[in-house]
Amino acid sequence: MFDSFWTTYLLLVAIIIARYFAIAGFFHYFLWMRPEEKVQASRLTRHEPTKETIRHEIVMSCISSFIYAAPAAAVMFMWEQGGTALYSDLSLLDLAYIPASIVIFLLANDAFFYWTHRAMHHPKLYPIMHRTHHKSLQPTPWAAFSFHPTEALLESWLLPAMAIFIPIHVGAALFVLMAMTVTSVTNHAGWEILPRSWLKGWVGENIISATHHNMHHTKFKGNYGLHFRLWDKLMGTDIMEPVE
Ligand SMILES: [Zn+2]
Ligand SMILES: [Zn+2]
């Protein structure tokens, strides 16, 4: 039984690290390694990513991957035993339930992240848990999982725990994890990849973009959310300069 857990765990570590290198590597190449005039995005900083920043972000992201994989492997292991709300069969109802479950998981994760992130900016918790992430004054695509192990541990268990109780199709769960990796990479990339018209419209008003999260890194306060601007707006912590 433990053989199967460790096999699942190590396989998940490998998948999470491979996915991180593929997505962060793609955006690093696409945004930072080509001539600026060819890049279809708006640059948010005049600073070039330094080797030290990237090295720090990669090391911490790899360590975090070992942490994220543990609760995920536990849930995969429980799934094999039939003890979770994960499912793989499809019915007609799934046409409506799959999008709804994706929204439920993202909203719950966003609320949890907002409050834990805000708490980690408290002077007592900041030096222990969150300084590692803010070591990147200007983050790069490699900062996607660049967290202190205590922060990674805190943020790693919610989604797997929800999958024990709230039904979610395995494909929807994979979609949520994939979307979170892509947005974490792009929101730290130092470039805004969303078109200006989107940024000015509904998407920019409600969804967290690189422009929004970059302000969290440069100003050190405000913009604590993960996916949506909802909690920041509700709690008066939203800062966003008007989009030209
Ligand atoms: Zn922060
Ligand atoms: Zn960040």
Image (cartoon, helix red, strand yellow):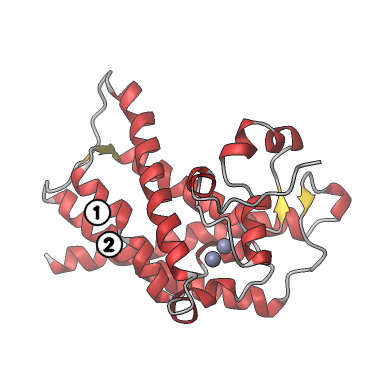
Residue at figure coordinates x 82%, y 64% from the top left? 46
* Amino acid at circle 1: Ala
Q: Position of residue 241 (x, y in %)?
A: 73, 49
Which residue was labeled with disc 1?
161
Check whether the beta carbons of the residues at disc 2 and disc 1 lie within 8 A of each other.
yes
Q: Position of residue 197 (x, y in %)?
A: 74, 32
Residue at figure coordinates x 76%, y 60% from the top left? 32
Q: Which quarter of the picture shows residue 43?
A: bottom right
Q: Nearer the viewer, residue 23 or 148?
A: 148
Residue at figure coordinates x 44%, y 80% from the top left? 124
Sequence-wise, the earlier of marks 2 and 1 is 2
Q: Position of residue 44 (x, y in %)?
A: 76, 56
Disc 1 under 8 Å from ligand 1? The reply is: no
Task: Work out which quarter of the rendered image holds the C terminus and state it.
Answer: top right
Indicate the quadrant of ligand 2 in the picture. bottom right
Q: Nearer the viewer, residue 114 or 142?
A: 114
Q: Which quarter of the picture shows residue 223?
A: bottom right
Rendered image: mark on residue 71: 2
Helix, strand or loop at disc 1?
helix
Q: Nearer the viewer, residue 115 or 193?
A: 115
